[in-house]
Amino acid sequence: QVQLVESGGGLVQAGGSLRLSCAASGTIFSIDAMGWFRQAPGEQRELVAKITRGGSTNYLDSVKGRFTISRDNAKNTVYLQMNSLKPEDTAVYYCNMVVPPWGDYWGQGIQVTVSS
């Protein structure tokens, strides 16, 4: 009933910036938590940042001060502004949304590559 589409990934040099977007479509009445996860090759998927419906946020320690998550409820969209990127930020990034009453949804994943 719900589809998530991510955009904004790509290749950037260390120290650069990227902005990821994830838009939800379908039968949506409201969206609770929105988040971004990432998975590097050979690693487990990890939570990068999360934002609640009320706007509270939390971040992975290694991205604090560099990444900012935000949401536009009118557009059913979540953003991840990534600044001062490092090679260790290289991963496939996935957005996640909790959409009542349907459940938990994931985007298809988008590659972010940071060159040194």
Image (cartoon, rainbow, N blue to C red):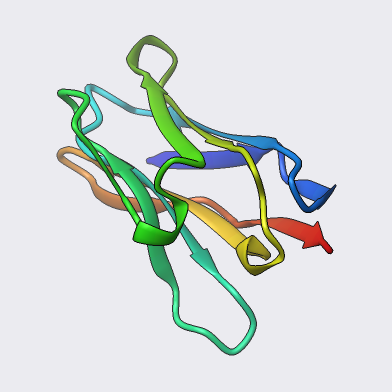
Disc tally is 0
Residue, x 84% and y 64% (percent of image)? 116
Residue found farthest to the bottom? 42
Q: Position of residue 113 (x, y in %)?
A: 77, 59
Closest to the observer, 81 or 64: 64
Image quarter (top left, top right, bottom left or bottom right) of the N terminus: top left
Q: Position of residue 3 (x, y in %)?
A: 48, 41
Q: Position of residue 86 (x, y in %)?
A: 67, 58
Residue, x 69% and y 37% (percent of image)? 18
Q: Is residue 29 above or below residue 6?
A: above
Q: Is residue 45 above or below residue 34?
A: below
Q: Position of residue 10 (x, y in %)?
A: 80, 48
Q: Is residue 88 above or below residue 2?
A: below
Residue found farthest to the top? 74
Left or right: where does residue 40 sit relative to residue 29? right
Left or right: where does residue 73 sit relative to residue 22? left
Closest to the observer, 35 or 61: 61
Examine the image and state in which quarter residue 30 appears. top left
Left or right: where does residue 79 sit relative to residue 71? right
Q: Is residue 61 above or below residue 101?
A: below
Left or right: where does residue 27 sit relative to residue 25? left
Closest to the observer, 14 or 76: 14
Residue, x 45% and y 81% (percent of image)? 44
